[in-house]
Amino acid sequence: MSVTKVLELSSSSAKGIEDAVQQGLSKAASTVKNIKGAWINEIKCTTRDDGSVAEWRVNMRVNFLVE
């Protein structure tokens, strides 16, 4: 039998959605072991005055195996 826990976090990147997800997962992995997956709950962006995207933001749930 295995048990997993879920950690909810937010991450951002000026490069794109994928980079925001990767940055969040990398940061979580620095303190959490056995990450098994993530669900992206929400995607947002901030914009500049001209309407272009300034930054992508994601809210995600990361699940990891409890030892």
Image (cartoon, rainbow, N blue to C red):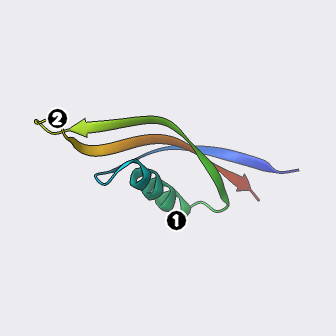
- Image disc number at residue 30: 1
Residue situated in front as seen by the camera: 5 or 54: 54
32 shown above or below 37: below
Residue at 40% x, 55% y: name it: 19
Residue at 31% x, 54% y: name it: 15
Q: Given the current orientation, which residue lies at the most extreme left position?
A: 49
1 shown above or below 30: above
Secondary structure of residue under mark 2: loop
Q: Amino acid at mark 1?
A: Ser
Instruction: Say if mark 1 contacts mark 2, CB within 8 Å.
Output: no
Residue situated in front as seen by the camera: 31 or 56: 56
Q: Residues within 10 Å of mark 1 (few under 14, many from 20)?
A: few
2 shown above or below 31: above
Q: Where is residue 20 shown, x and y percent of the image?
A: 40, 51
Q: Residues within 10 Å of mark 2 (few under 14, many from 20)?
A: few
Q: How many marks?
A: 2
Secondary structure of residue under mark 1: loop
Using residue 3 as the reference point, say whether residue 21 is left or right of it: left
Residue occupied by mark 2: 51
49 shown above or below 62: above
Spatial CA distance of label 1 from label 2 is 35 Å
Using residue 31 as the reference point, say whether residue 50 is left or right of it: left
Using residue 51 as the reference point, say whether residue 34 is left or right of it: right
Residue at 64% x, 62% y: name it: 33
Classify residue 61 by image quadrant: top right
- Reading the chain from its start, which is encountered first: label 1 or label 2? 1
